[in-house]
Image: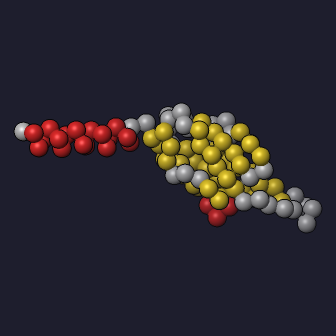
Amino acid sequence: MKKKLAAFAILSLLFTGCLGTHKINIEAGDEDLVNCPRRAKTGETVAVETVTVTDADLYLIVDGVNLEPIREGYYEFEMPDHDVNIKVVIKSNGLA
């Protein structure tokens, strides 16, 4: 009985750690991300770092969240209570 109770306690702790976490899916531009977690807990501040581009414009798109630019190449958002998709799009700005 003690072994079953111990196993249940361990499984409960492991499962509790997964509750409230959601996926961060990279839909496009994975090669342009320097740092981006693949999972985050609801309400957690998620920091995303992109490559720095010159002679082009970089757009970081995260569906369903307010993305806050911190400085060039660094962005943050609060993880919602659902999975999110990230896209990195680089477009020529005609200055090259």
Residue at 14% across / 38% down in the picture?
5
Picture quarter with the N terminus: top left
4 left or right of 31 in image: left
Identify the residue at the far right of this view: 95
**Which image quadrant is residue 28 in?**
bottom right
Residue at 24% across / 43% down in the picture?
10
Residue 29 visible in the displayed image: no
Residue 71 visible in the displayed image: yes
Residue at 69% across / 56% down in the picture?
50
Residue 34 drawn at (x, y percent): 65, 59
**Which image quadrant is residue 75 in?**
top right
How is colour applied across the structure in the image?
Answer: secondary structure
Above or below residue 94? Residue 41 is above
30 left or right of 42 in image: right
Q: Nearer the viewer, residue 8 or 62?
A: 8
Above or below residue 29? Residue 3 is above
**Which image quadrant is residue 4 in?**
top left
Count of numbered marks: 0
40 left or right of 96 in image: left
Identify the residue at the far left of this view: 1
Residue 26 drawn at (x, y percent): 57, 55
Picture quarter with the C terminus: bottom right
Residue at 87% across / 58% down in the picture?
93
Above or below residue 59? Residue 46 is above
Residue 76 drawn at (x, y percent): 66, 42
Residue 2 drawn at (x, y percent): 10, 39
